[in-house]
């Protein structure tokens, strides 16, 4: 069994009662936690994931503020709350080893070992636009500039 799932399984075995599940509304979102209002009470430090935050292979769905979420009470006394499902995703983060993938309203980012795909492609276009052909046809700089602009609108 996967380490994070087995950790969750062990946590659930320690409690006499299965976790309570609530609907809530997102008040604010941080890197690993968010604040959720359940009824009239606001709970801070609600985990965005039910498993260990330090794992290098993970999927995180960050909910939009004011959207609804499904929250599990892992402790039985609302000291350990975690998001199970989000209604509306503000940001999706996927990490697999040294590869990172992020989707937001601004576009999507792909990174590996500190290298960003948008930066690499942008640098490539810049270098191609510098090419001067003595005999034949030089690159169409306006067309390449337009393609670079389009890529910058998709990639971050």
Image (spheres, grey):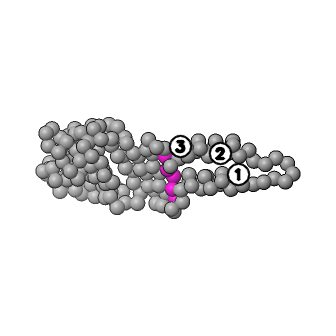
**Residue bearing mark 1:** 129
Whether the residues at callouts 1 and 3 have beta carbons within 8 Å, the answer is no
- Pointer 1: residues within 10 angstroms few (<14), some, or many (20+)? some
- Pointer 3: residues within 10 angstroms few (<14), some, or many (20+)? few
The percent position of residue 35, horizontal first and vertical second, equals 23, 47
Q: Is residue 50 left or right of residue 22?
A: right
The percent position of residue 30, horizontal first and vertical second, equals 30, 52
Q: Nearer the viewer, residue 51 or 15?
A: 51
Judge whether residue 122 is colored magenta.
no
Q: Is residue 1 left or right of residue 120?
A: left
Whether the residues at callouts 2 and 1 have beta carbons within 8 Å, the answer is yes
Q: Is residue 113 left or right of residue 122?
A: left
Question: Which label lies toward us, 3 or 2?
Answer: 2
Distance between mark 1 and mark 3 Cα atoms: 20 Å
Dot 2 or dot 1: first in sequence order is: 1
**Residue bearing mark 2:** 145
Quadrant, the N terminus: bottom left
The percent position of residue 37, horizontal first and vertical second, equals 19, 42
**Residue 109: mark in rendering:** none
Please tell me whether mark 3 sits on a helix, a strand or a loop: helix
The percent position of residue 64, horizontal first and vertical second, equals 33, 41
First to last magenta residue range: 108-112
**Residue bearing mark 3:** 154
Distance between mark 2 and mark 1 Cα atoms: 8 Å
Please report the residue visible at 20 percent of the width from the left and 50 percent of the height from the top.
Answer: 44
């Amino acid at each position: 069994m996967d380490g994070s799932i087995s950790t969750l399984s062990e946590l659930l075995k320690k409690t006499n009662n299965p976790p309570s599940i609530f609907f809530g509304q997102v008040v604010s979102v941080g890197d690993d936690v968010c604040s959720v209002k359940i009824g009239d009470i606001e709970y801070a430090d609600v985990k965005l994931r039910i498993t260990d935050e330090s794992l290098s292979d993970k999927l995180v769905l960050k909910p939009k503020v004011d959207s609804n979420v499904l929250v599990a009470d892992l402790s039985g006394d609302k000291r350990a709350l975690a998001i199970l499902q989000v209604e509306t995703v503000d940001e999706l983060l996927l990490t697999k080893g040294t590869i990172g993938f992020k989707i937001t309203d601004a576009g999507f980012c792909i990174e590996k070992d500190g290298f960003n795909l948008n930066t690499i492609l942008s640098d490539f276009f810049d270098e191609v636009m510098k090419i001067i052909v003595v005999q034949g046809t030089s690159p169409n700089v306006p067309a390449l500039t337009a393609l670079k602009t389009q890529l910058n609108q998709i990639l971050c």
